[in-house]
Image (cartoon, rainbow, N blue to C red):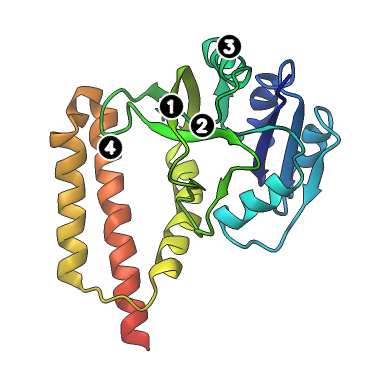
Amino acid sequence: MSTVGALLIVKNEEEKLAECLDSLSTWVDQIVVVDSGSTDSTCEIAKKYTKHVYSHCEWPGFGKQRQVAQSYLTTDWVFAIDADEVVTDELKQSILKETKSTERALFSVNRLSSAFGKQIRYSGWSPDWIVRLYPREMAGYNDALVHEKVIASKDIPKRKLSGYLLHDTYESLHHYSVKTTSYLKAWSDDREGRPSSLSKALLHAFACFIKMYIIKRGFLDGTHGFVLAWLAAHSTFYKYIDLWLRGRKK
């Protein structure tokens, strides 16, 4: 029988971690949690579900931290999940079915995300297919500081799982600000030295809003769609202005 291991990297996730682990604990064979310096009860909560809780406080970026977590797994399959995500029963059954097969493939899950208390069905957020299930000895994460991806040999097939992975991404505007700040810095760090300008920042921000709100039909998400498009445009402006300011400083 093939075994499935869950991979989590966390920091200060005491509010959501238990619900995530509850959705895993009855069917996965191993849960590995790598903490990057939590100051709340995250580790204590994790230890109620698994003995495989490790601390790696020197942050190397998302990709490398997931590699560290995978190094502790011993299962045939890896299922990567974040602390603010929950596996639905349909997704669980799909994972168990596919991992019993002799075929080795990269499996994508469809995330259904919520922001500020509402599920977002448009705005470019849904459908949101992302590789999260893969054979441990045939694939792993790249070294990206942010927006890390699973990489494998080109000949490995790609498949889709049924059922949603529920993602509670932003609870409040403060939560949005805290969560995105590290992503924005990592994005700029990864691209430092590339040219940017005020006009490029404005153009990318405007294009981001139009794409998200009009082309991706964010207006169908109501007020939430407008707010998310505006926030995304602001974040885009921030990223390119940060690059520009770093270049001028040098």
Residue tagged by mark 2? 105
Q: Indicate the position of residue 149 as horizontal and vertical percent values.
A: 48, 47
Residue placed furthest toward the bottom = 250
Where is 217 relative to 100, above or below? below
- Residue 235, quarter of picture: bottom left
CA–CA distance in space, label 4 to label 3: 35 Å
Name the element at disc 2.
Answer: loop
**Rendered-image quadrant of the N terminus:** top right
Q: Nearer the viewer, mark 4 or mark 3?
A: 3
- Residue 249, quarter of picture: bottom left
Residue tagged by mark 4? 227
Q: Earlier in the sequence, mark 2 or mark 3?
A: 3
CA–CA distance in space, label 2 to label 3: 17 Å
Question: Could you tell whether 36 is left or right of 127 in the image?
Answer: right
Asked whether the residues under the numbered discs 1 and 2 touch, taking CB atoms below 8 Å apart as contact, a structural biologist would say yes
Residue type marked 3: Gln
Residue tagged by mark 1? 159
At x 68%, y 45%, the residue is 70
Q: Earlier in the sequence, mark 4 or mark 2?
A: 2
Is residue 31 in view?
Answer: yes
Asked whether the residues under the numbered discs 4 and 2 touch, taking CB atoms below 8 Å apart as contact, a structural biologist would say no
Residue type marked 4: Val
